[in-house]
Image (tube, rainbow, N blue to C red):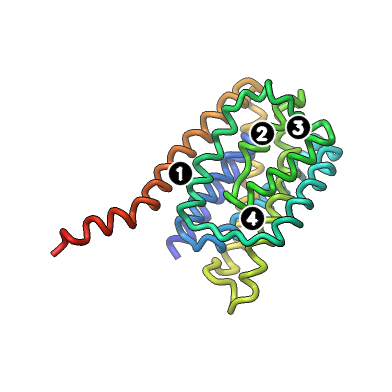
Amino acid sequence: MATYFALLFVVLFASTLSGVFGMAGGMVLMGALAYALPVSAAMVTHGAVQFVSNGWRAILHRRHVSWRIVGHYAIGSTLAALILVIVTYQPTKAWVYLWLGLAPITAWIPKRRLHLDAARRPDAILCGFLVSGMNVAAGVSGPLIDVFFVRTGMTRHSIVATKAATQTFAHSVKVIFYGAPLLTMTGLTGMPPLWFFAVAAPLAMLGAVLGGYALDLMSDTNFLKWTRWIVTGFGLVFLAQAAFLFLAPTLASTLAPALP
């Protein structure tokens, strides 16, 4: 019970963080869920909560959403979903944390040299394909999607709103990919109880509202600067956790002979 209440607090914090920067919150929530739940259950729970959080944020800022970009993104996301249906991918917690830790690297790519622009149809389709694939592999994809939006010339409100709308597709793919096998088992193995989702949904919506207020007070310059450093900080934490999980078996076997 204490674990579920702690996760609910993380849901509110992560949703507020995403409401301000359009990402980072998903990384925080995925890291917490991966620590507390089995990987598949963490992915489904994260996808469900983030679906509500992103969907509500898109509704709140709907007048800023570029629906043309969303439509093209959906095409790429659907293509990724079709490919993932025939691929068997079951990551361990160590690999999930590794992907989470490596994801922020994309925030430091010299994006001005990539010439990627989500406002162009081919780039928007490619964005949907890559982001949905990474969302399944790591659970999050915020830093990657940012690569496609830095050259759009959009305001911070339009970036947050459009990214929120597109991320609903990515999280839908993740929920289906990990949730379908769980449904064939006896119940949803390792999943939180239904009351957790009933409470998490309004908390995610509240966080989107609070984040929106903070976004109004921030300049476009500070928005871009702080986003990069925040995701990098969390990425370093997750890399440390991944290193521990990968090395733990080796350390245990090394120390075992020395134990009485």
Percent x, y of residue 44:
61, 60
Q: In this rendering, which labeled residue sits more in front, label 3 or label 4?
A: 4
State the CA–CA distance, disc 4 to disc 1.
19 Å
Q: Earlier in the sequence, mark 3 or mark 2?
A: 2
Q: In the rendered structure, are the residues bearing label 3 and label 2 in contact, judged by CB atoms less than 8 Å apart?
A: no
Identified at 13% across, 65% down, the residue is: 260
State the CA–CA distance, disc 3 to disc 4.
23 Å
Type of the residue with mark 4: Gly
Q: In the rendered structure, are the residues bearing label 3 and label 4 in contact, judged by CB atoms less than 8 Å apart?
A: no
Type of the residue with mark 1: Phe
Disc 1 target residue: 238
Type of the residue with mark 3: Ser
Type of the residue with mark 2: Asp
Q: In this rendering, which labeled residue sits more in front, label 3 or label 2?
A: 2
Check disc 2 and report its element: helix, strand or loop. helix
Disc 3 target residue: 158
State the CA–CA distance, disc 4 to disc 2.
19 Å
Identified at 78% across, 46% down, the residue is: 76
Q: In this rendering, which labeled residue sits more in front, label 4 or label 2?
A: 2
Identified at 55% across, 36% down, the residue is: 104
Disc 4 target residue: 47
Check disc 4 and report its element: helix, strand or loop. helix
Disc 2 target residue: 146
The numbered dot on residue 22 is: none
Q: Which of marks 3 and 4 is nearer the N terminus?
A: 4
